[in-house]
Image (tube, helix red, strand yellow):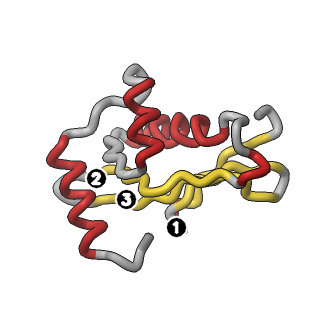
Amino acid sequence: MSDIRIRDDRGAGRLEALAGDEVVGRIEYFVLDAPERALVPVHTIVEPAHEGQGIAGSLARELYAIAGCEGVPVAPLCPYVVKWAARHPEEAPAADPALVQAAMDWLDAHPGRF
């Protein structure tokens, strides 16, 4: 994992894990603006050749760190991030269920986005 770096491509809605110039994993997310601002991870993907190296966990950890620096919550819809957050409550504060529902509603209203 030491040769992996993580980059936030906010404009594209991706938190990317890179090995050199190659994207080997990513969390696809969007920024919810209402009822409050939040980061909403939708999918976590790690390329098969890089599975089992802790990349997905590093991406989830970085997403929560970014949210913490920005002072916003994470409303996870991605099953991996939901499970990761449950295993790491000290790093991943639980999201308000109403905020998660608002994120689900946004996703339903934008079906082509993810």
- The structure residue drawn at horizontal position 72% and vertical position 35%, both measured from the top left corner, is 53
Q: Are marks 2 and 3 in contact (CB under 8 Å)?
A: yes
Residue neighbourhood size for the residue with mark 3, other residues' Cα within 10 Å, grouped as few (<14), some (14–19), many (≥20): some
- Residue 2: x and y in percent read 79, 32
- Mark 1 sits on what residue? 11
The answer for how far apart the CA atoms under marks 1 and 2 are is: 16 Å
Which residue is identified by label 3? Answer: 31
Residue 82 appears at what percent x and percent y?
39, 40
- Residue 3 horizontal/vertical position (percent): 82, 38
Instruction: Tell me the element at label 3.
Output: strand
The first of marks 2 and 3 along the sequence is 3
**Would you place residue 114 above or below residue 102 in this image?**
below
User: Residue 37 — which label?
Assistant: 2
> In terms of sequence position, does the residue under pointer 3 or pointer 1 come before the other?
1
- CB within 8 Å, label 3 to label 1: no
The kind of residue tagged 1 is Gly
Q: Label 3 to label 1, Cα distance in Å?
A: 10 Å
The residue located at (42%, 57%) in the rendering is: 42
Marks 2 and 3, how far apart at CA: 7 Å
- Eyeballing the image, is 4 above or below 102? above
Give amino acid for label 3. Answer: Val
Which residue is nearer to you in this view: 108 or 93? 108
Above or below residue 1? Residue 11 is: below
Say which element carries label 2: loop
The kind of secondary structure element at disc 1 is: helix
Name the amino acid type tagged 2: Arg
Q: Earlier in the sequence, mark 1 or mark 2?
A: 1
Q: Residues within 10 Å of mark 2 (few under 14, many from 20)?
A: some
- Point out the residue furthest to the bottom here: 112
